Image (tube, helix red, strand yellow):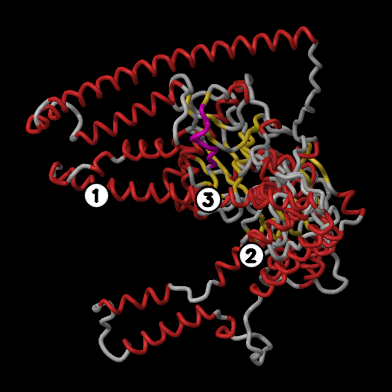
């Protein structure tokens, strides 16, 4: 499988022997969906290999966009901003459609090979089977007009790999080639050394989908380490640990049972983790120095706070003196001169000035540390927040009257909150007094007190339990349940009666409910609770919680309680405050917290080659594709199909997955007749055999007969490409 990890690639250097090759020496390009390979015909390995992707990040210093092809050096990428860009491929399902990106890739490939402005060599480029005419014509236009190639030829990569392995003796003249690449998989029948394009089969499943599926599964399984599970790392994990299960269902059942075989097949990826070191115990001198430094810093903060407090007191005193002088001035003048004096200030009335004097007085007392009465503070804060609430209406403008209504509403709400708070304080004080009385009784006679508390607890439990049960009158429905009307309380039944009568009265004619004042009396009757079951239930639950807290030995209780250490409360009736919740203790992180476990993902991800519906692709698997291709062969007898079944070659990057060949052989055998011969072999090098086969083909003397010259291209144009079909048997 073509590696995609940046660590597996090195930046190719520019070749220096380009001028040594004759102009008749072809250039061989294996234009794969994952990897671009380019080299000279007749050589055993390509000169240049890089990922077939382009990225356009911006330089962090200048902000200019830079075009980067293939994998980049991490030391170089630190100078670029890649957050708003991503890798772009010229392919869509193994077909070139982004020729702008393809031009960047070809520029980089020819430059690394040593070419300058033009490429004065014949070019042999690989393509997928049944490549669309539009893609082939644009590729020919790019090679002829942009790079000045004298002639070009197009061949299928899987066929080149098959012909090379045929020379090695691994397959025969008639057979099947199963090519599972980066984004697609093909099955191509070969009869007498030539592909039968009408019987080939293709599915859009490849190594990319396996890697992407693995990344998704690991991200869902370990969401806390999602930043570490990159696409490149998932590709590396796939190449190292994934395999194809011979029987997917039985393999999955083993991991569900968790037996020893499953544990042996489980792999662990340890993320970087450094154990926390135990700090050295500081010496007495160090502790003394730290204490002195802390005291010095504290004294500095206290001095700063004192200075700010002194400044605040001075400001408040000056402001208070100014308001007192203004109030004294208003007392000395006539009433008709008050408005003229107030016009030069920010106040509207005497009441507002008095409220501000009260507010400043309270603030000054607070700044000096003097005690402040709660009621005074509340009154001062209300007068400060809502000064217009106490001003007469005749002294206010229309805008101020609107503001006064708003302030009156807010003031009323604030007073309600204060009353509610005061009520809660009173209830707490009542409970404290009750607890004190209970404690005094317990100290006087512990045995009698314990007996009384247990009796009180049992009584409250029975009453709460009875109130929580559905109220029934003994009548049950056919299913053994209780009807809704039998579960209603008396108050709820009364509300239902009122609603029913209102609907009956108003449903006979025009709906005029609300036109009369007596209609709204119905709402009061419906909202009125004739019995206080709900309120009494809440009170009894609160009392039950208090009694339970007294009986239960609890360290969190405010009073020392060891009445009945063996007491176990009933948690189904009321939650016990303070003693039942168990908080998870802090646990320091260990190396196990930084591990990513691969178990079922190892064989579940490659299973998409045989069951594409696992990732939502409704297409055939590899084994089914082979059967479909054999059935599509026209005018071929069973003896020839049997000969082809004995020569099934698996090539492409996915052929490197362990267990793929036995699984594929078992799947094809189920589709073939009983006892029919079958042999499935892997290519000698599934990744490089396509380029090597093309290199041998381009180095043969018959290659010039299979090329398209630039003169023929200009004369015949696209019609020549439509009729073009390479002959592989030469």
Q: Secondary structure at mark 1?
A: helix
**On the image, numbered disc 1 is attached to which residue?**
405
Q: Nearer the viewer, mark 1 or mark 2?
A: 2
Q: Which residue is most to the front?
A: 444
Q: Measured along the vertical axis of the image, is residue 292 above or below residue 415?
A: above
Q: Residue at x 12, y 29 (%)?
A: 343
Total residue callouts: 3
- The overriding secondary structure of the stretch rendered in magenta is loop
**On the image, numbered disc 2 is attached to which residue?**
540
Q: How far separated are the C-alphas under marks 1 and 2?
A: 42 Å
Neighbourhood count class around disc 3 (C-alpha, 10 Å): few under 14, some 14–19, many 20 upward: few
**Residue 648, horizontal then vertical, whole percent:** 78, 58
Q: How far separated are the C-alphas under marks 1 and 3?
A: 29 Å
* Numbered circle sitting on residue 664: none
**On the image, numbered disc 3 is attached to which residue?**
424
The stretch of residues the image draws in magenta is 81-89
Describe residue 610's horizontal placement relative to residue 365 as left or right.
right
Look at the image and tell me in which quarter the N terminus lies: top right
């Amino acid at each position: 499988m073509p590696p995609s990890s940046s660590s597996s690639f090195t930046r190719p250097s520019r070749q220096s022997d380009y001028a040594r090759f004759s102009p008749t020496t072809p250039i061989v390009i294996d234009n794969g969906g994952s990897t671009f390979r380019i080299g000279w015909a007749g050589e055993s390995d390509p000169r240049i290999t890089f990922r077939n992707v382009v990225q356009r990040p911006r330089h962090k210093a200048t902000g200019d966009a830079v075009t980067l092809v293939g994998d980049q050096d991490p030391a170089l990428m630190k100078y670029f901003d890649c957050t708003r860009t991503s890798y772009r491929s010229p392919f869509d399902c193994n077909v070139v459609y982004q020729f702008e990106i393809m031009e960047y890739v070809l520029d980089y490939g020819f430059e690394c090979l040593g070419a300058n402005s033009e490429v004065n060599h014949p070019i042999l480029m690989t393509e997928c089977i049944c490549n669309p005419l539009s893609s082939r014509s644009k590729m020919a236009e790019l090679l002829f007009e942009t790079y000045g190639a004298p002639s070009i030829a197009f061949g299928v990569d899987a066929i080149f790999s098959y012909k090379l392995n045929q020379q090695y003796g691994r397959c025969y003249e008639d057979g099947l080639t199963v090519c599972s690449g980066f984004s697609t998989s093909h099955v191509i029948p070969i009869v007498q050394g030539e592909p039968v394009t009408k019987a080939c089969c293709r599915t859009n499943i490849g190594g990319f989908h396996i890697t992407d599926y693995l990344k998704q599964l690991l991200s869902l399984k370990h969401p806390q380490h999602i930043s570490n599970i990159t696409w490149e790392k998932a590709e590396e994990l796939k190449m190292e640990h994934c395999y194809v299960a011979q029987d997917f269902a039985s393999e999955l059942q083993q991991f569900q049972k968790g037996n020893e075989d499953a544990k042996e097949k489980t792999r662990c990826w340890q993320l970087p983790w450094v154990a926390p070191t135990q700090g050295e115990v500081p010496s007495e001198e160090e502790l003394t120095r730290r204490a002195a430094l802390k005291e010095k810093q504290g004294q500095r903060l206290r001095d700063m706070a004192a200075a700010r407090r002194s400044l605040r007191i001075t400001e408040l005193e000056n402001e208070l003196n100014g308001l007192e002088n203004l109030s004294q001035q208003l007392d000395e003048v006539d009433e008709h001169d008050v408005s003229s004096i107030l016009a030069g200030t920010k106040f509207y009335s005497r009441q507002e000035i008095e409220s501000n004097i009260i507010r400043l007085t309270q603030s000054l007392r607070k700044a000096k540390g003097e005690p402040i009465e709660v009621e005074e503070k509340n009154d001062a804060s209300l007068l400060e927040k809502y000064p217009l609430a106490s001003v007469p209406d005749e002294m206010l403008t229309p805008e101020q009257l609107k503001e006064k209504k708003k302030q009156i509403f807010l003031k009323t709400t604030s007073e309600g909150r204060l009353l509610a708070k005061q009520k809660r304080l009173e209830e707490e004080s009542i409970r404290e007094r009750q607890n004190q009385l209970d404690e005094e009784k317990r100290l006087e006679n512990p045995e009698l007190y314990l007996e009384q508390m247990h009796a009180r607890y049992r009584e409250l439990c029975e009453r709460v339990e009875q109130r929580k049960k559905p109220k029934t009158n003994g009548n049950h429905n056919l299913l053994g349940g209780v009807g809704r009307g039998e579960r209603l309380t008396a108050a709820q039944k009364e509300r239902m009666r009122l609603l029913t009568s209102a609907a009956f009265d108003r449903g006979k004619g025009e709906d005029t409910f609300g036109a009369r004042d007596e209609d709204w009396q119905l709402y009061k009757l419906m909202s009125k609770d004739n019995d206080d079951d709900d309120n009494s239930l809440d009170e009894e639950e609160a009392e039950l919680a208090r009694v339970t807290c007294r009986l239960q030995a609890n360290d969190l209780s405010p009073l020392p309680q060891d009445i009945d250490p063996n007491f176990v409360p009933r948690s189904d009736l009321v939650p016990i405050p303070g003693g039942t919740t168990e908080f998870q203790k802090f646990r320091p992180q260990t190396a196990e917290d930084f591990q990513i476990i691969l178990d079922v993902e190892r064989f579940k991800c490659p299973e998409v080659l045989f069951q594409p519906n696992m990732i939502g692709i409704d297409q055939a698997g590899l084994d089914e594709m082979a059967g479909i291709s054999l059935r599509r062969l026209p005018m071929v007898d069973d003896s020839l199909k049997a000969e082809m079944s004995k020569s099934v070659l698996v090539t492409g990057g996915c052929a490197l997955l362990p267990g793929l060949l036995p699984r594929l052989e078992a799947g094809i055998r189920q589709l073939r007749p009983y006892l029919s011969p079958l042999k499935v072999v892997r290519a000698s090098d599934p990744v490089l055999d396509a380029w090597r086969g093309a290199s041998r083909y381009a180095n043969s003397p018959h290659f010039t007969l299979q090329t398209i010259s630039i003169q023929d291209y200009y004369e015949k144009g696209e019609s020549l490409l439509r009729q073009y079909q390479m002959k592989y048997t030469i």
